[in-house]
Image (cartoon, grey):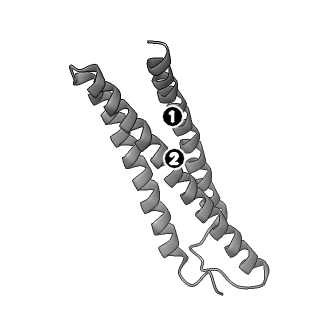
Amino acid sequence: MKYANNPQTFMNGFYSSSRNVFLTVSIAIAMYGFSGSFKLGVSVDMIKDISLLIFIFSFMLGVNNIHIFYNYIKALEKERDNGDVLPLYVNLKLWRRYLYIKIYFMILLIVLIIASSRRLFNRRFFS
């Protein structure tokens, strides 16, 4: 029972990390929208570039979170298959749903990153 000692703490960490991803995406979106309020084109471009970097940071944080949570679920399943009893509140099917929801959000985030990158690319090379 190596991994199942305190799975609720791990789940709380997953929620916290997910919240951090959502917050950093919100900050990046706000910065991208705020960039239009500048009068200098250089300032607009710089703020948009920074928001793109925050988008990428958020994506990397989310992918890391998904990877760690997936590995933890696999470890719990392995322990369960070896005969260890998981706490009653641990529903691995439900936990996988949270993982799928996060993956879906990461797909939406990659679409935002591609859209922002495309605008950056067009701005840099075709203006």
Q: Which quarter of the figure is the C terminus placed in?
A: top left
> Where's residue 76, x and y in %?
67, 75
Secondary structure at badge 1 equals helix
> Where's residue 32, x and y in %?
34, 31
At 61% from the left and 81% from the top, the residue drawn is: 4
Do the residues bearing badges 1 and 2 touch, measured as CB atoms within 8 Å?
Answer: yes
Q: Residue furthest right?
A: 82
Q: Which quarter of the figure is the N terminus placed in?
A: bottom right
Image-based side of 66 in relation to 74, left or right: left
Q: In this view, does 64 lie above or below 119?
A: below
> Where's residue 67, x and y in %?
62, 60
In this view of the protein, which residue sits in the foreground, 44 or 113?
A: 44
At 56% from the left and 73% from the top, the residue drawn is: 89
Q: How far apart are marks 1 and 2 (CA)?
A: 9 Å
Q: Residue 16 carries which label?
A: none
> Dot 1, how many residues are within 10 Å of its Cα: few (below 14), some (14-19), or many (20+)?
some
Image quadrant in which you'd find residue 124:
top left
Q: Is residue 9 above or below residue 69?
A: below
Q: What residue type is labelled 1?
A: Ile
Q: Residue 59 carries which label?
A: 2
> Dot 2, how many residues are within 10 Å of its Cα: few (below 14), some (14-19), or many (20+)?
many
At 51% from the left and 68% from the top, the residue drawn is: 11
Image-based side of 125 in relation to 71, left or right: left
In this view of the protein, which residue sits in the foreground, 43 or 31?
A: 43
Q: Which amino acid does label 2 sit on?
A: Phe
Secondary structure at badge 2 equals helix
In this view of the protein, which residue sits in the foreground, 6 or 22?
A: 22
Circle 1 is placed at which residue position? 113
